[in-house]
Amino acid sequence: MRPTFPVFAGLLSLAAQVGRADPTWPAATDEIEEIIYQLKGFRARLFGDVIIPCSNEASGPGRQNAAEWLRVGFHDMSTANKYFGAGGLDASLQFELTNGENTGPGHNTTLKFYSNYYSSRSSMADLIAAGVYASVRSCGGPIVPLRLGRVDATAAGSNGVPQPQNSIVTFQQQFDRMGFSPVEMIQVTACGHTLGGVHTTEFPDLVPAGSTSNGEAPLDTSVAVFDNKVVTEYIAGNTQNPLVIGPSIAVGRNSDFKVFNSDKNVTMNAMTSAASFASVCQTVLQKMIEVVPAGVTLTADPIAPYMVKPVDMQLTLNSGGSTLLLTGFIRVRTTNLPTSNIKSVTLTWKDRSGGNKRGSSGTCSTTATLQGVTTGFDDSFGFFPISATIDASTGISAYTVTINLNDGTTQSYDNNGNLYPISDAIIFQKPQSCLLQGSGALTVAAVVRNDYIAQPINLGVSYLTPRNTPDGNPVPKLNSYSATMTQGNCVGQYTFFTASYAVTGGMSYNARISVTAGNGTGAPSDSFNIASDLSGTCAAFSGSAACTSVNVTTSSSASASSTAAASSTSSSASATPTLAIKPKVGGYNRVSCWTEGTGVRALTGAAFAYDSMTLESCMANCTGFAYWGTEYGRECYCGNSLAASSSQAANADCNMVCGGNQYEYCGAGNRLELYATSTLSASASATSTSSVVSSTATGSSTVVSSTGVSVSSSAQPSQTLGIKQTVGSYTFVGCQTEGTGIRALSAATYADDAMTLESCAAYCKGYTYWGTEYGRECYCGNSIDSTSTTAPLADCNMVCAGNKYQYCGAGNRLELYELTPTVSSSSSSSVTPSSSKASSSVSSSSTLSTSTKPTSSGSSTSSATPTLAHKPTVSPYTFVSCWTEGASNRALSAKSYSSDTAMTLESCASFCSGYKYFGTEYASQCFCGDTLDSTSTNASLSDCSMTCTGNQYEYCGAGDRLELYVNPNVVVPTGPTQPASVTANDDDKVWTFVNCYTEGTAVRALGSSSFAADTMTLESCATFCGSGGYQYAGAEYGRECYCGNSFGSGAVVATASDCSMTCAGNGSEYCGAGNRLSVYSSSSSSSTA
């Protein structure tokens, strides 16, 4: 249901709108027009979410956000100096929050909210003015006419915000400096103080602690209504305004009384009627937001909603290259034309020459019916979705819109005689563009009509970065980046161009992307595309029409000119490219076709994979690295050195074409198309000392050792990669799997990028077993988990990170060693070391149950008989005490499991590896977490009296009691995290994190049910989806929750760091991001999608 905002809507809200034609589209005001009018419903911008209703206290009890928005407008304006033409509404407030004149959190939280809408087309100053309009209207006040065009300040203005302790003379001088007369001073103060109140935290001398229930003393009896009670209660003498009566009098801070009484209440008496109050406030608040610095010119007319407006109209070159797809919406204002009266909307286009050529599609029009409705404070709008296929040979230059009514009549709109322009000269190709929101890695693809490819094709990116300045400025910095795009394949009448850029600052989802053909204001462009709409993976362009030239001639019947080219253009595309090796790409020279290393990547600095891979995009991805190479048609690898076990291969081996350019080679399976920087490549061929490998004329290679000394391939060290049979007092056992859901060796562990067998043996000194895994990990233990088994020796094929001549296991595989001689007392292990990697074995029953570690001498016996006791350490954890559960929550809530037969302290510690705490409970339960619930407390040690189901000599808590352990080396993050699991609020069901997901293609990833709230948490989303019986819950954009049992078409796993927006209701958790969902699965369902 649409909210109502009734006060004087007829008299005051329509005056600026009735009888006015639509502005000519597109206009500089379009972005803010959508922000302030599309508030609720379909495609809503949600600008009013924290101020609707007016009583909304999203920033905390006693803090009406609408009142704070209104105050921000005044505080930002009030440093204006009409005599010097300085200051005014210019967003300088962001730099003035710590100067002592702008107390309280309201300014900060308001500016932070506005930052969600800050862009190159919506200045912060205009947003502050829009906030005044919105806050007044949300609370039932008049429409404050809103003109746009404000320019943001880059530094703080002068001091001068009026303070409560000022004298009336000072107030009058300050308001005169701003440009307000004594009467207007009274009026704007009254209008600004009809909402909200004064707070204890900022003014304890005016509102003593405990004097109000919520820390707020209201300025009138209707804190959440824009009405005249601030006037009438003052005149009647029954006001409770703390700036008129109370403690403020004694300390001389009764500022409202000083102002109101300055003309013996004449002005206040004139504002006692509701109508006069509303009319005066409309005028004086408009004046307030139109105080701007000298040189700033606002739009001639206040902003008003379009009757008909194209929204997000976008062209895309379809697969094959012979047709274009036009998508978007026609938005129709339905305030006075109900949707029930509208049958459909028809869009009719002109070809690229301004004529009526239909091409192969056989039509030049498309008709749409209503898809959704959005509402604002005073208006409603219907959205009609457009989807039309256009022959690429005829193209499109402009269109008209016809509203078809149910009574058979029509209304036609031609953009004030100009038609609605759209250029097909350059197109932002969204499917072939992508963004990794976590890293900010952006790849942009555009298709350029072949008569424009001689022009410079430019990428423009505007993006926000947090300032992180000592003054706590909440408004991010607006940055811009531009670059020349790289030409790629020709497809039909278009040629691909690409560019890449790393959007820094962690706010890449807010970036806006533009592509332009040529220079100057008349150059065709596809602008202001939101980056959050991009997938995490660039799609491949399938099919390829023959490359053709384009001839554009302007039709004499055209009534509007496209923004595209000159009136008559004829040019032919460049020569048809052929598949060949590229000897040079940018600043890199081709080295050769190159193999991967033995059990290791040749290049390990960074890696990328996408279906639109080109040599140019890989080079851009690897900016700053000495080497890069493409592999398997779609993979890209970067590094500053090459693995010693990688080597030159025959050029013929690199025979796969690039996914994004059929005329380039991108390696093959286990083969890299290798490039090196020009300088390094040249120096390598001269046998320099830099870390480079380069082909020489004879085909030999130069390999640089880890010391940086150049060594020719004929002078390699004699040492070779192989199994090391003994390491100190330990003997090689074999290749061993990890356990099922548990580590094979769980007593101690560490990881190191300089891992060797010797360093792992030294670390595990005294343990019976140790093993290396994944090239850089080391594990120790006195027994091997029973679910761990022998694996083929060939499985352990990764070399040690610190010694390329040693094996250090592999993924889920341990290079296993045992203390020599083997402890014999209770072991049934059978170990037969061998010099061959194919014959060593260890029986599956090789489990030692010694109660003490063997000594380093290599001979030990299982000495003491084990006894039941509280274990002081379960490495790397130490015992804390017996601990209670929380009053209504688990003490440890991150993750848990139970075992009625095999629970031990060691298995629980392994399960909770990486968490700060683990605890066992009720003999069979294990719980993990980084924090303890605040209501959980220390209990008597004797309370933890139940033995573990898997070890009768260990204690595992009791009912409502945890045997609690802590790892002091784990540093709990102070910032937000993506919890591995969360617990629903209603049934304690545990939901496990699945992954960060993209939305689907034109559908929701999880589309069965949803809700949105400013109190959103992962727990509340899981609770909501659980109550509906859904398997998956996904949190998006900080405040949205979606549910489903399966994923919509096109939804794919994104980089986990893409989900980077904190939850609106819990700043310590991530709730997805723009077009990204943090997806969780209920514990009763699979945790994979």
Image: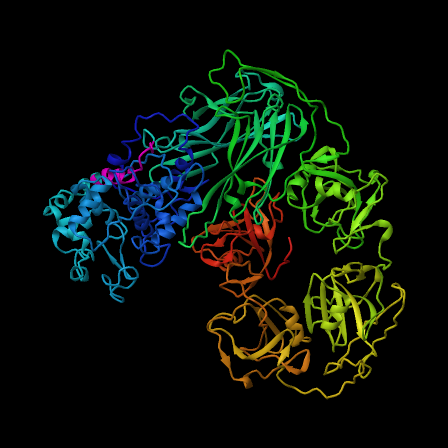
Which corner quadrant of the image does residue 842 belong to? bottom right
Vertical position of residue 175 compared to residue 17: above or below: below
Residue 94 at x, y percent in the picture: 37, 48
Q: Residue furthest left?
A: 264
Q: From where the camera sits, is residue 56 visible? A: no
Q: Which of these two is toward me, 321 or 877?
A: 877
Please give left or right for residue 67 compared with residue 652 in the image: left
Residue 468 at x, y percent in the picture: 46, 52
Vertical position of residue 490 compared to residue 512: above or below: above
Vertical position of residue 1 compared to residue 251: above or below: above
Please give left or right for residue 1079 compared with residue 903 in the image: left
- Is residue 293 inside the magenta stretch? yes
Please give left or right for residue 88 compared with residue 460 in the image: left
The N terminus sits in image quarter: top left
Q: Which of these two is toward me, 38 or 932?
A: 932
Question: What colour scheme does the image use?
Answer: rainbow
Q: Residue at x 52, y 17 (%)?
A: 354
- Is residue 1031 inside the magenta stretch? no
Vertical position of residue 869 compared to residue 277: above or below: below
Q: Which of these two is toward me, 941 or 579?
A: 579
Residue 95 at x, y percent in the picture: 37, 49
The number of discs equals 0
Which corner quadrant of the image does residue 685 belong to? top right
Q: Residue at x 19, y 57 (%)?
A: 253
Q: From where the camera sits, is residue 998 visible? A: yes
Residue 810 at x, y percent in the picture: 76, 60
Q: Which of these two is toward me, 1043 or 1037?
A: 1037
Question: Which stretch did the figure color magenta?
Answer: 280-298
Q: Residue furthest top?
A: 556
